[in-house]
Image (cartoon, grey):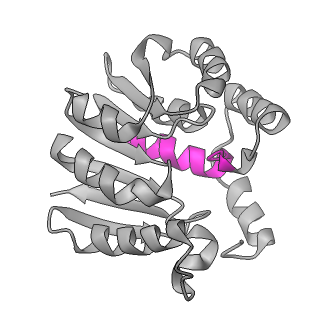
Amino acid sequence: MHFIPEALEDYVAQHSAAEPELLQQLNRETHQKVLQPRMLSGAYQGRLLALISKLLQPKAILEVGTFTGYATLCLAEGLATNGHIDTIDHNEELAILQNKYFNLSPWAEQIQSFLGDAADIIPALSHKYDLVFIDADKENYALYADLIIPKMNQGGLILSDNVLWSGKVIEAVNDKDVSTKALVDFNKKMNEDPRLETVLLPIRDGLTLSRVR
């Protein structure tokens, strides 16, 4: 679903920072070899993620939902010296592709991958995070947020992807549509949580920025 005309989307992309060569390669390989390549953050959103990270210069980043590692590498661009990024995914079949591009990047030693259920892994992480990107199973977004917020440094930023869900969040929700219902509840929760200051941006499929007070 396009929230602005495609021609205008193209104009926006053409007047934003160019996709780095390594990410172009990962983009192509994801589309050639991986099911549901549209899950990739993509060039425009990737440049936004990179810019946000560069503005924050986080010492510690957490990503929930690695997929093929595209957003991981975008976020890593802003890491502070000696900073690190923890990234979680449940799909071990993607590990080879992820590691291929992590190892080709300048941040190979700063990326720690975790395989398994994020709801189990997040509580065991010992770091305090400056930047978090949530882009995994939508029905658990609220759970992940509740697990993550106590692990955030004051002023830290939580980014949540796909929060407009192709516009379904403003339509009548079918009781069987678990993902849409979960996102409707999540969007309300993030806006009303007194621990957060939230803005929802209509970028691609919706991106929420939530600052920890």
Residue 81 is inside the magenta segment: no
Whether residue 129 sits left or right of residue 158 in the image: it is: left
Residue name at image x 47 percent, y 36 percent: 75
Which range of residues does the magenta coloring cover? 39-56
The quarter of the picture where residue 116 lies is top left
Q: Is residue 208 above or below residue 77?
A: below
Front-lying residue, 159 or 77: 159
Look at 15% across and 61% down and name the residue there: 195
* Left or right: 121 as drawn, with respect to 20: left
Residue 125 coordinates in the image, percent (x, y): 25, 28
* Residue 204 location (% of width, % of height): 62, 63
Quarter that holds the N terminus: bottom right
Q: Quadrant of residue 18?
A: top right
Name, please, the residue furthest toward the front: 176
Q: Main secondary structure of the magenta part?
A: helix
| Residue 165 x %, y % | 58, 68
Q: Residue at x 26, y 57 (%)?
A: 211
- Residue 45 to residue 191: above or below: above
Q: Is residue 53 covered in magenta? A: yes
Q: Is residue 54 visible?
A: no
- The answer to whether residue 176 is seen in the rendering is yes
| Relative side of 17 to 201, left or right | right
The one nearer the camera, 78 or 164, is: 164
Q: Quadrant of residue 14?
A: bottom right
Residue 207 vs residue 10, the one in the foreground:
207
Q: Quadrant of the C terminus?
A: bottom left
Q: Is residue 119 above or below residue 99?
A: below
Judge left or right: residue 30 versus residue 100: right
The image shows residue 60, relative to residue 213, as above or below, that is above
Question: Residue 64: x and y, percent?
Answer: 43, 41
